[in-house]
Image (cartoon, rainbow, N blue to C red):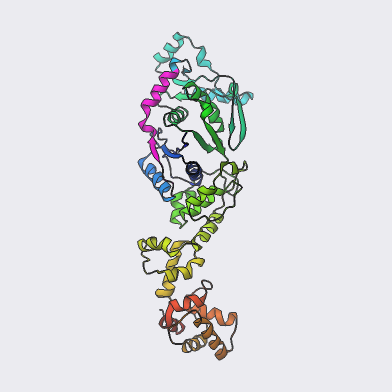
Amino acid sequence: MTTRVRFAPSPTGRLHLGNVRAALINWLFARATGGRFLLRLDDTDAERSTEEFAASIKGDLLWLGLEWDEFARQSDRFDSYYAAIERLKEIGRLYPCYETAEELEQKRFRQVAGGGPQAYDRASLRLSETQKRSFEAEGRKPHWRLLLDHREIAWTDVIRGPVSFDGAKLSDPVLLRADATPTYTLATVVDDIDLGVTHIIRAEDHVANTAVQLQLFDALGRNTAALTFAHFTLLTDAGGHNLSKRLGSLSVAALRDQGIEAMAIDSLLARLGTSLPVEPVPTLGELVATFDLASFSRAAPKLDLEELRRLNARLIHGLSFAAVADRLRRSGLDDVDERLWNAARSNLATVAEIGLWRDICRGQIAPKIDDREFAATAARLLPPEPWDEATWQNWTRTVAGATGRKGRELFRPLRLALTQREDGPELKILLPLIGRARAFARLSGETA
């Protein structure tokens, strides 16, 4: 049987790193097993779902390299949900309930106060037909609940191992709201059946949902023995708190705007919470080759944005010019050639920072000069071109002999005059790129 997995975001916000981790794990599993990756938009929340968010989700996934093999959206599948509702009614597994939201809240409050289980008390099962007609005469429209079997629900989770729930302690879930819209619980199970999902890989906050959904799978005729579940631990921030889609700084769009590379995000999220080392991996194919659900730990991994930035820098340091050339041209940096890229890349935190070194080597900067006499002497001693990597050592040796300076006293003022910066690539590499004319002008105190 072909492996089929799904990533099912709600288009009610932008993807953040917690969402992306779920998508990436499913995508890697599909590719590692020769399976299919389904993108399904869970957009039954018509008030909050937007086409803008749907488009941004697709765009972010494609930017990360996570192309899908199939696409579906729940808003196109209501006929399937209503057919499932009718089937559940026919077999006696769905029953109408007439409590208002306020009445249900009062019940929950009393259950909490009494220390009892917070589950629906099945009061509506005891209603007579007369009582139901009376509620409907008041204008109440029922919501419909799945009648759970009060038995043990158990499965072996790929990551968590054996898991079991007492069905008697679970609340009968609402499958159809009073406004006749299906709930997540119903829609996701019907979709997983119709779309042939074989492995449900998602975060551990869905473990209790799985217990309920297993009974719903059974009721709708899906062989649950052929389903595999894996629940991975949730990412937390540095303080141990769960991530939220409202944390805009962790959205894919925000990180992309900050210059974070797609493969830096993929490299980090593929390895966080596993026994494998977190390191820059140049391609998704290499991540696929090492992917194994068995490597995932039960401990909650902490997401450190500084670790992501360090990973990003390490990834960039290994990028060839060919890998960035098209992007540089699209960004207006078409005068950055391979020689300049190779000279500066080990000092870049983002690809866009090459623009700084382009300006230093090819553009104009105002020099920083503390001792004009020393700078003028250094300018006078500049050798004629052509220059190569030996030029810096030969020139500074001559300047040292003429001025008596050495070490930091010699090199720091030359670097500041030539680049404005205290740090950067080795000047033996930069000096030939800057050229004699610019170097002479800057040592003379001119903007060049």
Q: Nearer the viewer, residue 135 or 17?
A: 17
Task: Indicate whether 48 appears above or below 268.
Answer: above
Magenta stretch containing residue 66, yes or no?
yes
Q: Dividing the image into 4 quarters, which one contains the C terminus?
A: bottom left
Q: Is residue 72 left or right of residue 288?
A: left
Magenta stretch containing residue 241, yes or no?
no
Q: Of all residues shown, which one is farthest toward the bottom?
A: 402
Task: Pinpoint residue 91: horizontal percent, then vertical percent.
Answer: 46, 15
Task: Indicate whether 236 appears above or below 346.
Answer: above
Who's the residue at 58% across and 44% down the image?
Answer: 241
What residue range appears in magenta?
65-88
Q: Of all residues shown, which one is farthest toward the front?
A: 1
Residue 141 visible at all: no
Who's the residue at 45% across and 65% down the image?
Answer: 353
Task: Pinpoint residue 382: horizontal percent, then vertical percent.
Answer: 47, 87
Residue 199 visible at all: yes
Q: Nearer the viewer, residue 342 or 304?
A: 342
Who's the residue at 50% across and 73% down the image?
Answer: 421
Q: Of all residues shown, which one is farthest toward the right?
A: 115
Q: How many marks?
A: 0
Task: Pinpoint residue 147: horizontal percent, then vertical percent.
Answer: 51, 19
Using the rendered view, name the quadrant where residue 81 is placed: top left
Using the rendered view, name the quadrant where residue 407 is placed: bottom right
Task: Pinpoint residue 409: horizontal percent, then vertical percent.
Answer: 58, 82
